Amino acid sequence: MNPSLLIFIISFFVALAMSGILLILAQTYPKTIRGLREWSLGALAIALCFPLFIARDHIPDLLSIILANLTLLLAFMALNVGTRKFAGTPPKYNHVLLALFVLTFVALFVWFTYVQPDIRMRVGTMVLFTLIVVLDQLFLVLRALPRTMGRHIWVSSLAIMIVSRLIRLGALLIGFAPPTGVFDASASQLVYVAIPALTIPLGTISLILLASEKLRHDLEFISRHDGLTKCLNKNAAMEELEREIAHTRRHGNKLAIMLFDLDNFKDINDTHGHLEGDRILVEFAKKVKASLRASDQLTRFGGDEFMAILPDADLEQARLVANRFQETGKGSQPVAWSVSIGISAWLDPDDTLDALLTRADKALYKSKALGRNQTQSI
């Protein structure tokens, strides 16, 4: 059997299996992990183009040349769309430009198949257009995806495709080992057609890893954050506070906390409904986060109670931050709200977590007892 034909058959079954795996993930993983369906369709399109290539000389050129190569290009584009959806990056090009890109590709293949038949130009066209798509995807992956094992493998897979295409394009330009047919048994052609047999499983493994890493990250986020406000939940906040206290004890740094309580929040829920109450909680959390430093952390203790952890801050610095919140809710529409704040700071190495929280809690109740919408510290 011709070696190229054998490689095409192997690549077909590998791509088909990889498409099935990605489709299963798309059906079973949470909908928040986007792009899996497009990745699956891309792998399926790669699989479907191989039977068309294999049937060369047995079916019309319209199918075995033009449709086969167009299917392969669209497969790369589908993978690109999937990666953009996965990364949450909006499309870079509009539909008109994409249509012109594909139509130009088809026109060149029609020309070099029927008007001026030239397999070297067809291969060059295929290499150049897929190189553009793969380069675009590589830049996207490097820019938008976190540095994980899945990303590293995906980058490696894309790099293999890019290097092989650059070498192929250079060889075509200088006339080295020009292709004579799809089943050309030359060493250069065998290497080129063998690339998919390597990159298809390698790429699929990377996509599966990316999806699994995203799932694990989402689950960890859910376990540590409040579902409504996206603040740290109480358990996670206590862990962070204990970590900051240990750091403060070790290095002698400052540390302050602020306890927040939305004033008359029960009345808001009773009068305007729980949906409006939830909206206010989300609005409050966003405005507090916007006013805090990157090193500060906000947690929802439960209900309408929040806590901010302020590393390297004393009572005066915390009070300056708190004063910015007092007028925050007055302009809120359609329901205005206010907040009472209690502040405490780490005193000395003999201080404790419980004592720190108790002082902040007493300061908060003092704020409420004095008429609410104010800040007190102990």
Image (cartoon, grey):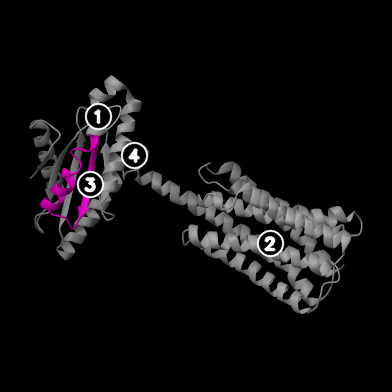
Residue 201: image quadrant is: bottom right
Q: Are marks 3 and 4 in contact (CB under 8 Å)?
A: no
Residue 314: image quadrant is: bottom left
Image x and y of residue 369, in percent:
9, 31
Q: Is residue 346 left or right of residue 236?
A: left
Helix, strand or loop at disc 3?
A: strand
Image x and y of residue 176, in percent:
78, 79
Q: Crowdedness of circle 2 by 10 Å Cα count: few (<14), some, many (20+)?
A: many
Q: Which residue is mark 4?
A: 229
The kind of residue on which mark 4 rests is: Thr
Helix, strand or loop at disc 4?
A: loop
The kind of residue on which mark 1 rests is: Ala
Answer with mark 2 or mark 3, whichever residue precedes in sequence. Answer: 2
Report the span colored magenta: 304-329
The kind of residue on which mark 2 rests is: Thr
Q: Which residue is mark 1?
A: 336
**The C terminus lies in quadrant:** top left
Q: Crowdedness of circle 3 by 10 Å Cα count: few (<14), some, many (20+)?
A: many
Q: Which residue is mark 3?
A: 308
As for residue 308 lying within the magenta part, the answer is: yes
The label number, if any, that marks residue 130 in the structure image: 2
Q: Are marks 2 and 3 in contact (CB under 8 Å)?
A: no
